[in-house]
Amino acid sequence: MALQISEVVASRARWGLLGLWIIVLAELLLNPVAKVMLGPKGPLASLLPDQLHCVMVQGQCVAVHAEGLSASIFWGMVLPILVVVLFLFGHELWRRVCPLSFISILSREFRSVARDWFHRGDAEYSKKVIPPVTLKENSFLRRYHSCLQLAILYVALCCRILFVNSERSFLAEFMLFFILAAIIVGLLYDGKTWCQYLCPVAPVEEFFMGPRALLGNTAHLLARRRGQVTQSMCRKIDEQGKEKSICVACKQDCIDIDAEKAYWSGLMSPRKQFLSYGYAGLVVGYFWYYFLYAGNWHYYASGVWSVESHQAQRIFNPGLFLFGHGLFIPKIVSVPLVLGLFLLGGYGLGVVIERSLGKWQQSKTGNFNPVVLRHHCITLNTFAVFNFYFVFSGRNYIERLPAPIPLYVPAVLSAISAVWLYRTWGRRSIDYYNELSQKKEGAGIS
Ligand code: SF4
């Protein structure tokens, strides 16, 4: 059963989420709520990681502060929920309500309104058809955007570990940086250039969805007529109150128009391999770094990293702690080093495994289908990373839920991923194209 929401509802959700984000930013900058709510007897004090028990980092109890509720909730609750939403509903639901995408679209709209206002009274201008401003066909961003987006995500994760995890003012500046970038891109380009080519969440959306999300809409089955508004396609409500496409073709095989088409058409590209295996390596490296830094898993599992005192002042402290000894590689060097090695290692390992499986299948059966092999490797990779992610992420909050919920949450998440795996494993591009041509024949579209 797919979730379909009207543009009116999506618009309200966008404004609501934008308002919430502004409140979160104000809280991060001024901290008015946390001061009251997180005092020793504050009603939300129990949401903070347990401060009574010592959590060891490099053989010493880590010092904590009690003002980081927003940062702690953002990392421990909001992000894991977002990953579940992406996995269940695909990119389309999130892309339609994402406040960062909305900010970029608002600045794009502001540009057109400002341009019209500037040329008001110009009779010649009002007759002109202004062509959309999109990236040039062979521009750097069009060709290498996946690598760039994964690189931005890598830098963002390094910044998280070094500065942002528990320093609320840094987290606010981190968010403001992305808001500013989205505004600038919206002012310069039409379509969803920010989401398609620069946003670091886009590779995460693509990674967790695979060809079809469990509860996502299948665009090709909705293709009843040309110009049908599908999935998270750019749209507006016309004078008759109907949703109308305002696509300016800023992206070929756009994921917002038909995610499954985008999946099959890009499956055999080196870009897809780098994104899938590189992202898997980055996720594994990200969680392992906490162990390599603290010398134990309790540091991550307790969530104390989200309320750690003076995080940014430790960047020149030893960044690795192995076998009871700190290695004097400063944290500011070891974080990018470890995450970078895992990212490249994940990519290299994925490519080697896929190639070896191909050779093995070829020698065994004398014939193998590289598209099916790539699809199977990427599907298994997504399944494994989703389950690995939830071994760690959000655990400090899940364990605070009343019994027996903490026992059921991992079981439910594993069951969801198993259903996704079952549904995705046997899917083939031919199924998609057959369904599409049947649908078009039925609808009389040539
Ligand atoms: S629907 Fe069209 S304008 Fe919107 S992101 Fe996709 S290609 Fe760009």
Image (cartoon, helix red, strand yellow):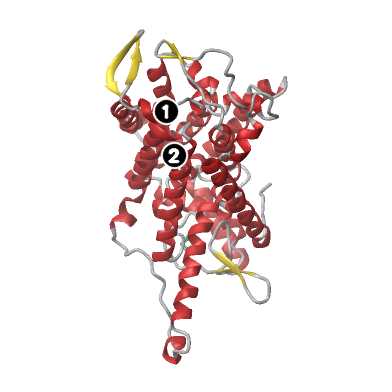
Q: 147 above or below 166?
A: below
Q: 248 above or below 426?
A: below
Residue most extreme to the right:
403
Can you identify the residue that label 1 sits on?
311
Q: Judge the density around disc 1: few (<14), some (14-19), many (≥20) Cα neighbours within 10 Å.
A: some
State yes or no: Cβ of the residue under disc 2 lies below 8 Å from any atom of ligand 1.
no
Q: Nearer the viewer, residue 277 or 424?
A: 277
Residue ID at (40%, 45%): 267
Mark 2 and mark 1: span between their CA atoms?
10 Å
Asked if the residues shown at circle 2 and circle 1 are in contact, with their CB atoms under 8 angstroms apart, the answer is yes
Amino acid, disc 2: Phe
Instruction: State the image coordinates of residue 302 (x, y, percent, origin top left).
Output: 54, 20
Q: Is residue 256 left or right of residue 415?
A: left
Can residue 251 be seen by looking at this rendering?
no
Labels 2 and 1: the sequence-earlier one: 2
Instruction: State the image coordinates of residue 37 (x, y, percent, origin top left).
Output: 66, 32
Q: 405 above or below 167?
A: above
Amino acid, disc 1: Gln
State yes or no: Cβ of the residue under disc 1 lies below 8 Å from any atom of ligand 1.
no
Figure quadrant of residue 377: top left
Residue 344 - label: none
Q: Nearer the viewer, residue 277 or 351?
A: 277
Residue ID at (43%, 43%): 174
Residue ID at (72%, 22%): 402
Q: Nearer the viewer, residue 347 or 429?
A: 347
Instruction: State the image coordinates of residue 71 (x, y, percent, origin top left).
Output: 53, 35
Figure quadrant of residue 10: bottom right
Q: Nearer the viewer, residue 390 or 296?
A: 296
Q: Is residue 134 left or right of residue 192?
A: left
Can you identify the residue that label 2 sits on?
170
